[in-house]
C-alpha cells in the first residue's frame, strides 16, 4: 500500500510538471505582451504589417485560445491521444515535423555522446593506470580546458579550418553521414572533458577503497586493476552520461544553427520566436519524456553496476589520503596570467569605439587588437571577466546548494521532475525568462541557474545512494543514529567533496551557457564586455581577428584549469567514516 501511494505521488508530480510546462509554453505570448495572431502573420509575411482583417482571419482559422490555461488544456487533451496539432505558421502536422527532427537530434546526440565517452575514457584512462600502480592521479588540466571550450566557437573553428580551408568535411547541411562529423565533434569534445573530470575524481576516490589494496596484494595485473577502477568509478558517472545525452539532445541550438541542422533545438528556437505554440509544446513534451526515460535508464544502469553490494551493505568506504602539494605550478601560472590580463584590462577603456581601427591586429596601443567596432580587446577581456566569472560563480553557488538539498533527501533515486527540467534546452528557459524580465545578463543568469542545479542533484543523488548502501551507514542506523546525525556525520561529509569539485568544474560550463544565450540574443547585449557577448560579436570575424575570439576562450580555459586544481580533500569526506571504524562514533 505504501509503495502504491509513493508511486502514485511520484507519477502525479511528474504529470504536474509536464502540465505546468505546457501551461508555461502556452503563456509565452501573454508573458511577452504580444498578440499571437500578429506574430504568426509576421512569420508568414515577413516584414509586412498585417491589417485588422488579416488578424481576424488568422484567429478564426486557427481558433487561437483566449488564454494560456485554455490553450494548454486543449493541447494536452489532444496530446494524450497522440494528436499534437498543426503548426500555426505553415499548417503542417506537428507530429511529423517533430518525428523527423527527433531522429536528426537523436543521431547527432548519440554521435556526440560517443565522442564524449571516447574523449572521457582517453583522458581518464591514464588516471586509472596511475592509480592502479599506487600513485595519485594527476590533476585533469587537459579535461578542464576542454570543458571550458565554447561549443559554438569550436564549431566555428571546425567550419573555418576543416570544412572551408582543408575541405575535409561539409560546412553545413544535413544530407548524409559526412555532415554528422563536425557537429558531433563540436558537441562531444567539451562534454568529453567534463566526463573525464568526473571520471578522474571518481577514480581518485575509488583508488583508496580497501578492495584495491586487496587486489594489489593478491597480485592482480596493473591493466586488470585499472579496468576494475574505471568500472567502479563509472557507477557514479553513468547517471551523468544520461544527463549529458539529454542535454546534448536539447541544448545543441547554437551548433545546429551554425551547421544548419534541422534538429529539435533549432526547430524549438524558431517556433518560439515565431510563437508557433503547437510546435514548441510538442518539442517540450518530447524532450520531457526523453529526459524521464534517460534518467530512468541512468539510475537502472547505476544499480546494475553496483550489483549486490548496493542492496546488501556490501560497499566499503574509502579513506582517501590528503592531497600533496604537487602539480601546483600549472594552476599558479594560470592564476597569475589570468589576474595579469584582467588587471591590465581593467585599467583600459572598454567602451571606446574607434571604427578606423576595427579588427586591427596586436599593436602597442592595443596589445590584443580590436574588435569589430574598434574597441580594445584587452579592455573588453578584463571588464568582461568581472561580469562573466562573477555571474557564473554566483549561479554555481546557488545551483550547488539546491543540488545538495534535493539530492540528499531520503528515498531511492527515481526518474522525475529533475530529469524533465534537465531535458529542456537552456535556450527555451532563456526565452521564458527573457519574456518575463526582458533579455539581459540577469535573465541569462537566472535561466542558467534554473537548469544548472540538475546535474549536481543527479551526482549528489548517486553518491548518497552508494553511501546508504554501505556497511558503516547501515550499522549507524541500527545503532540508533537519527536522520540529522546520519546527514551530518556520514552523508554530507562523503558527498560534499566530490560534488563541490563537480560544481567547480561547471563554473566554466555555466559561463558558457550564459555566453550561448548571449550568442543567440537572449543574454547580455552586443555592447556589453561580457565574454559571451564579446564572442557573439567576434566569432563571424574569426579569420580576420582571431584574438578577439581567442581572448575570451583562453580566459575560460584558464578558469577551467583553476577549477581542476581546487582541492576537495579536507572538506570533511573522511571524518565521519574514520570515526565509525575506530569506534568513536557516538550514535
Image (cartoon, grey):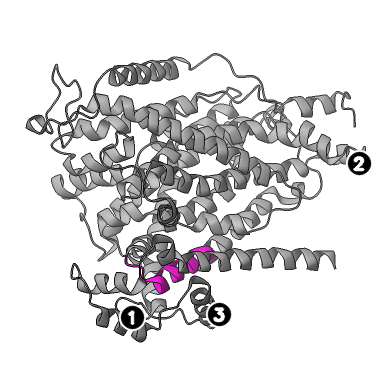
* Image quadrant in which you'd find residue 529: top left
Which residue is at 75% across, 24% downward? 575
Q: Nearer the viewer, residue 162 or 510?
A: 510
What is the spatial separation of the Cα atoms under label 2 and label 3, in whole angstroms? 47 Å
The percent coordinates of residue 326 (x first, y second) are 52, 15
The percent coordinates of residue 18 (x first, y second) are 57, 66
Residue 452 inside the magenta-drawn segment:
no
Which element type, helix, strand or loop, lies under badge 2?
helix
Q: Which residue is mark 1?
A: 92
Residue 246 in the figure: left or right of residue 348: right
Residue 286 inside the magenta-drawn segment:
yes
Q: Is residue 206 above or below residue 113?
A: above
Q: Is residue 133 above or below residue 426?
A: above
Q: Which residue is mark 2?
A: 478
Of callouts 2 and 3, the N-terminal one: 3
The percent coordinates of residue 295 (x first, y second) are 59, 57
Which element type, helix, strand or loop, lies under badge 3?
helix
Which residue is at 48% across, 73% downward? 67
Instruction: Report the span colored magenta.
Output: 274-288
Question: Which numbered tag is attached to residue 80?
Answer: 3
Of callouts 1 and 3, the N-terminal one: 3
Q: Nearer the viewer, residue 250 or 373?
A: 373
* Image quadrant in which you'd find residue 220: top right
Question: Which numbered tag is attached to residue 41?
Answer: none
Residue 178 in the figure: left or right of residue 4: left
Q: Nearer the viewer, residue 496 or 534?
A: 534
Which element type, helix, strand or loop, lies under badge 1?
loop
Q: Around disc 2, counting alpha carbons within 10 Å, would you say few (fewer than 14), some (14 to 19), or many (20 or more)? A: few
What is the spatial separation of the Cα atoms under label 1 and label 3, in whole angstroms? 19 Å
Q: Nearer the viewer, residue 63 or 514?
A: 63
Amino acid at each position: 500500500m505504501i509503495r502504491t501511494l509513493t508511486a502514485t505521488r511520484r507519477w502525479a508530480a511528474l504529470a504536474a510538471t509536464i502540465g505546468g510546462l505546457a501551461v508555461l509554453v502556452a503563456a509565452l505570448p501573454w508573458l511577452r505582451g504580444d498578440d499571437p495572431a500578429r506574430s504568426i502573420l509576421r512569420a508568414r509575411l515577413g516584414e509586412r504589417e498585417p491589417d485588422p482583417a488579416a488578424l481576424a482571419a488568422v484567429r478564426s482559422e486557427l481558433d487561437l485560445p483566449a488564454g494560456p490555461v485554455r490553450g494548454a488544456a486543449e493541447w494536452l487533451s489532444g496530446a494524450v491521444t497522440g494528436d499534437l496539432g498543426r503548426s500555426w505558421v505553415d499548417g503542417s502536422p506537428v507530429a511529423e515535423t517533430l518525428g523527423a527532427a527527433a531522429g536528426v537530434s537523436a543521431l547527432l546526440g548519440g554521435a556526440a555522446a560517443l565522442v564524449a565517452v571516447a574523449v572521457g575514457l582517453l583522458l581518464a584512462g591514464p588516471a586509472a593506470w596511475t592509480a592502479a600502480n599506487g600513485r595519485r592521479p594527476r590533476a585533469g588540466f587537459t579535461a578542464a580546458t576542454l570543458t571550458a571550450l565554447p561549443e559554438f566557437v569550436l564549431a566555428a573553428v571546425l567550419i573555418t579550418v576543416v570544412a572551408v580551408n582543408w575541405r575535409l568535411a561539409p560546412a553545413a547541411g544535413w544530407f548524409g553521414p559526412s555532415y554528422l562529423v563536425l557537429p558531433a565533434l563540436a558537441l562531444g569534445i567539451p562534454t568529453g572533458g567534463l566526463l573525464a573530470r568526473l571520471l578522474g575524481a571518481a577514480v581518485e576516490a575509488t583508488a583508496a577503497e580497501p578492495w584495491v589494496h586487496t587486489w594489489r596484494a593478491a597480485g592482480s595485473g596493473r591493466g586488470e586493476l585499472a579496468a576494475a577502477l574505471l568500472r567502479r568509478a563509472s557507477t557514479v558517472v553513468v547517471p551523468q552520461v544520461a544527463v549529458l545525452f539529454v542535454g546534448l539532445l536539447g541544448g545543441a541550438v547554437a551548433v545546429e544553427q551554425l551547421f544548419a541542422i534541422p534538429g529539435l533545438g533549432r526547430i524549438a528556437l524558431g517556433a518560439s520566436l515565431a510563437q508557433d505554440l503547437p510546435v514548441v509544446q510538442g518539442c517540450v513534451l518530447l524532450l520531457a519524456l526523453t529526459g524521464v526515460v534517460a534518467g530512468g535508464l541512468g539510475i537502472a544502469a547505476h544499480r546494475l553496476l553496483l550489483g549486490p553490494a548496493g542492496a546488501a551493505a556490501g560497499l566499503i568506504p574509502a579513506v582517501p589520503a590528503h592531497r600533496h602539494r604537487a602539480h601546483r605550478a600549472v594552476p599558479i601560472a594560470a592564476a597569475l596570467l589570468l589576474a595579469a590580463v584582467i588587471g591590465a584590462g581593467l585599467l583600459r577603456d572598454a567602451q571606446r569605439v574607434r571604427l578606423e581601427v576595427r579588427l586591427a591586429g596586436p599593436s602597442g596601443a592595443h596589445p590584443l587588437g580590436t574588435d569589430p567596432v574598434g574597441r580594445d580587446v584587452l579592455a573588453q577581456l578584463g571588464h568582461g571577466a568581472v561580469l562573466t566569472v562573477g555571474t557564473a560563480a554566483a549561479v554555481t553557488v546557488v545551483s550547488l546548494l539546491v543540488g545538495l538539498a534535493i539530492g540528499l533527501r531520503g528515498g531511492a533515486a527515481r526518474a522525475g521532475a529533475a530529469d524533465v527540467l534537465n531535458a529542456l534546452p537552456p535556450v527555451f528557459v532563456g526565452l521564458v525568462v527573457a519574456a518575463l524580465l526582458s533579455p539581459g545578463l540577469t535573465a541569462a543568469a537566472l535561466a542558467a541557474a534554473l537548469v544548472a542545479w540538475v546535474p549536481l542533484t543527479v551526482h549528489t543523488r548517486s553518491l548518497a545512494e552508494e553511501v546508504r548502501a554501505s556497511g558503516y551507514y547501515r550499522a549507524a542506523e541500527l545503532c540508533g543514529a537519527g536522520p540529522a546525525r546520519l546527514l551530518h556525520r556520514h552523508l554530507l561529509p562523503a558527498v560534499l567533496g566530490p560534488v563541490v569539485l563537480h560544481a567547480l568544474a561547471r563554473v566554466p560550463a555555466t559561463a558558457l551557457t550564459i555566453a550561448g544565450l548571449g550568442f543567440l540574443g537572449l543574454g547580455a547585449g552586443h555592447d556589453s564586455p561580457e565574454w559571451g557577448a564579446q564572442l557573439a560579436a567576434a566569432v563571424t570575424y574569426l579569420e580576420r581577428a582571431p584574438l578577439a575570439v581567442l581572448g575570451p576562450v583562453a580566459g575560460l580555459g584558464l578558469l577551467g584549469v583553476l577549477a581542476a586544481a581546487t582541492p576537495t580533500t579536507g572538506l570533511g569526506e573522511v571524518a565521519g567514516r574514520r570515526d565509525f571504524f575506530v569506534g568513536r562514533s557516538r550514535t
